[in-house]
Image: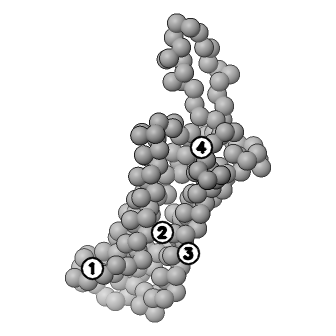
Amino acid sequence: MNFRISIPLIIAVYAACVMLSAYFIEYVLGYKPCELCIIQRYPYYFIILSSIALFALKSRIIPINHSHFLLKRAYAGAYVAILLASMTGFSLATYHFGIENNYWQNFSGCSDRLSSIELNATNLLEDINKIEPNCSDPLKFFGLSLSGYNIISNTLIAGLLIFDLINNKKNYI
């Protein structure tokens, strides 16, 4: 088996680190994510699984005894799956970033829902837990919101994948 470091493995580890940092911010630091923040995680799950599958194909961990043609199609399918997931993540992050910066109105998922909650002194703690995050004041690190970092992250993943595909296209397609 060939276990050398490859770009699909780097992408899988990077995407896993992104997910771990999101969970760290949510559960350790205590910042509650909005619905769009949670939806933006789904492409990363797919990227992690597809990158691991591509790494396994490239390093022959998954033995395929079929023709060379089928192996090339499996490579191409894994590349397409990762790229589509990255583009979906980029689109969701761009949409979320636009809402945070008032470039456009949201359609769902990220809003201020205080209007439907009646706060009273007897159930104050329970009522505070019902308040969902508002995207008009996002958590920022070094002046950029997490959706902004997500845009950069998905661009980096797509760029690495395209770089790997260009350098190895004769072997895979």
- Say what amino acid the circle numbered 1 marks: Phe
- Say what amino acid the circle numbered 4 marks: Leu
Measured from the top left, where is residue 67 in percent x and y? 31, 88
Q: Give the residue furthest to the bottom.
A: 170
Give me the disc on residue 3: 1
Give the left or right position of residue 84, taking residue 1 as reference. right
Instruction: Give the Cα separation between the discs numbered 4 and 2.
Output: 28 Å
Instruction: Please tell me which residue is depicted at 51% across the width and 38% down the height of the picture.
Output: 31
* Pointer 1 or 4: first along the chain: 1
* Pointer 4 or 3: first along the chain: 4
Task: Inspect this view and state whether residue 74 appears.
Answer: no
- Say what amino acid the circle numbered 2 marks: Ile
Task: Inspect this view and state whether residue 146 appears.
Answer: yes
For residue 134, above or below residue 72: above
Labelled pair 3, 1 in contact (Cβ < 8 Å): no
Instruction: Give the Cα separation between the discs numbered 4 and 3.
Output: 26 Å
Q: Name the residue that disc number 3 marks.
A: 159
Can you tell which of label 1 and label 2 is closer to the viewer? 1
The answer to which quarter of the image holds residue 134 is top right
Labelled pair 2, 3 in contact (Cβ < 8 Å): no
SS class, disc 1:
loop
Instruction: Give the Cα separation between the discs numbered 1 and 4.
Output: 39 Å
* Pointer 4 or 2: first along the chain: 2
Q: Residues within 10 Å of mark 3 (few under 14, many from 20)?
A: some
Tell me, what colour scheme is on the image? Answer: one colour
Q: Name the residue that disc number 4 marks.
A: 139
The residue lying toward the viewer, choosing from 142 and 13, is: 142
